[in-house]
Image: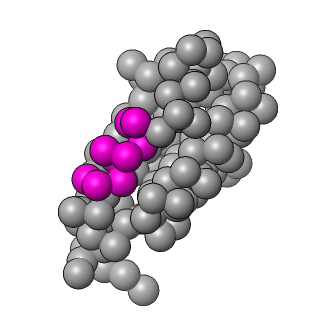
């Protein structure tokens, strides 16, 4: 089975980073419990490569925001689809719907990817 990856790029206010980390920590456990192989949430560090468009620009991050680059690896797209169905009904994830989100979902970029090269 060919692995499948969901990728995310989003700006998060520095003031909300701890709340985002707490939410992502719960999500990591839930996604892996339901079948994800790997789950990563990374915060921007070296974000201004010379001569290239930065991910800060791509995420339209403001001065008071950091960039989060995240990805989730699944055994295949069918497993990903199954996991997403379970995630939507999980009470731990539903609990976040009743709280203010630590980021603006309308500014989050996301997509599903077939693996082209794995090394």
Colour scheme shown: one colour
- Residue 74, above or below 57: below
Q: Give the residue displayed 61% in from the left and 15% down from the top.
A: 99
- Residue 66, above or below 83: above
Q: Nearer the viewer, residue 83 or 102?
A: 83
Left or right of residue 23, residue 106 in this image: left
For the question of whether residue 43 can be seen, the reply is no
Q: Nearer the viewer, residue 118 or 100?
A: 100
For the question of whether residue 63 can be seen, the reply is yes
User: Residue 98 at x, y = what percent?
Assistant: 56, 14
Q: How many marks?
A: 0
User: Residue 93 at x, y = what percent?
Assistant: 53, 34
The secondary structure that dominates the magenta segment is helix
- Residue 109, above or below 118: above
Which residue sits furthest bottom? 119
> Where are the magenta residues, as a range?
81-89
- Does residue 34 show up magenta in the picture? no
The quadrant in which residue 108 appears is top left
Q: Quadrant of the N terminus?
A: bottom left
Left or right of residue 97, residue 76 in this image: left
Q: Give the residue displayed 47% in from the left and 39% down from the top.
A: 90
- Residue 28, above or below 76: above
User: Residue 18 at x, y = what percent?
Assistant: 78, 32
Q: Quadrant of the C terminus?
A: bottom left
Q: Give the residue displayed 58% in from the left and 25% down from the top.
A: 95
């Amino acid at each position: 089975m060919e692995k499948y990856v969901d990728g995310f790029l989003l700006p998060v206010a520095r003031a909300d980073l701890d709340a985002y980390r707490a939410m992502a920590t719960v999500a990591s456990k839930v996604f892996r419990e339901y079948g994800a192989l790997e789950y990563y949430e990374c915060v921007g560090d070296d974000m201004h490569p010379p001569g290239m468009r930065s991910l800060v620009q791509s995420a339209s991050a403001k001065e008071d925001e950091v960039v989060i680059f995240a990805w989730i690896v699944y055994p295949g797209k069918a497993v990903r689809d199954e996991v997403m169905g379970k995630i939507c009904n999980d009470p731990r994830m539903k609990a976040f719907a009743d709280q203010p989100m630590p980021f603006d979902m309308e500014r989050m970029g996301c997509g599903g990817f077939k693996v082209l090269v794995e090394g």
